Image: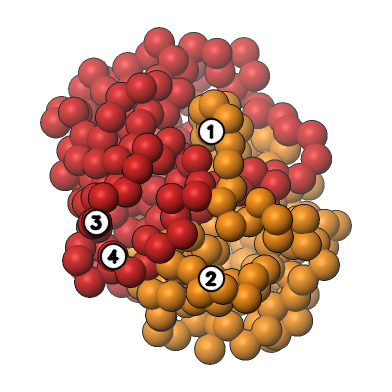
Chain colours: A red, B orange
Amino acid sequence: MVDFKPIGTIRSPYTDPEGMPIQPAGAVGVRGNVEVFDEYVPGLSALDGFSHIILLYEFHRSSGFDLKVVPFLDSTPRGVFATRAPRRPNPLGMSVVRLERIEGAVIHVLDIDVLDGTPLLDIKPHVPHFDSQGEVRIGWLEEQGNEVAERRSDSRFR
Amino acid sequence: MVDFKPIGTIRSPYTDPEGMPIQPAGAVGVRGNVEVFDEYVPGLSALDGFSHIILLYEFHRSSGFDLKVVPFLDSTPRGVFATRAPRRPNPLGMSVVRLERIEGAVIHVLDIDVLDGTPLLDIKPHVPHFDSQGEVRIGWLEEQGNEVAERRSDSRFR
């Protein structure tokens, strides 16, 4: 087992999984706060130079998992690892959000697609040239991908 | 505490933290295997349509952390959350690698910058338009970022 200890809490307008956006692309302009526990605040130094940050967190309202899921954007069952579904073998979430400003222990962010009260595990700077080499293909999302801004979550957390 | 259970093991040519590339951008063309435990293989369905996958894993050879670190690409101390340093409050690693092919429980990947034997926690599809809205700035890396392909790891895992 790998044990992680939350380093903070994510605050957002979304208190219920149903109806929330399913990706930052569907949450453009939505404000949230990342509240880092006091002991970790020195670790935020220099973060404010980045326009986007990667939040890694626990999908704390998700329980259990299926290895095949029907994704939000599709009607065909796909392997869970080919989706961003919250119900996963390890309920580990990742969102890239826009950083607005940092005030002490609070990071003000935009485009937040995360439930209020979510336990934060890590923050990393978003550096596109670290994270993708060469031409990109997005599989089953090639046709459905443009719908992400309009779709909302449903019962898939449960 | 948040408990995760490894879903597989990452295999790479890097058996020692020293001398390994520090990002996939520095490991272009380097081959590795992601070996998923048998019980999770059905979850890989449809993953082969994606050119790139996100690996989330434990930095299992890293111990402890400092909140201020001198990054590989710099000589100034920065907050750990503004870096990709392996020694972090939660030693959670993320790499975007190129998917070559999937054979049963083995995902053949390229551009691997991960230590051999690393415990795999999750796989997600890489979907650029999910993960970055608007113009990107990369803070202290603006000047140093282009060096990432040449730089190698040193003692920063310890």
Rendering coords of residue A116 (x, y %):
18, 38
Q: Are marks 3 and 2 on the same chain?
A: no
CB of mark 4 within 8 Å of CB of mark 1? no
Residue B75, quarter of the rendered image: bottom right
Please state if B109 lies on the left or on the right of B140 as rendered.
right
Rendering coords of residue B120 (x, y %):
52, 63
Q: Are marks 2 and 1 on the same chain?
A: yes
CB of mark 2 within 8 Å of CB of mark 4? no
CB of mark 2 within 8 Å of CB of mark 1? no
Please state if A32 lies on the left or on the right of B4 as rendered.
left
- The residue indicated by pointer 3 is A104
Q: Marks 3/2: CA distance?
A: 22 Å
Q: Marks 2/1: CA distance?
A: 21 Å
Residue A11 in view (yes/no): yes
Residue B132's mark? 1
Look at the numbered disc 2 and give the secondary structure of its residue.
loop
Q: Marks 3/4: CA distance?
A: 7 Å
> Dot 4, crowdedness within 10 Å: few (<14), some or many (≥20)?
some
Q: Amino acid at mark 1?
A: Ser
Task: Choose mark 3 or mark 4, whichever is in front.
Answer: 3
Task: Choose mark 3 or mark 2, whichever is in front.
Answer: 3
Q: Marks 4/1: CA distance?
A: 25 Å
Q: Are marks 2 and 4 on the same chain?
A: no
Q: Amino acid at mark 2?
A: Ala
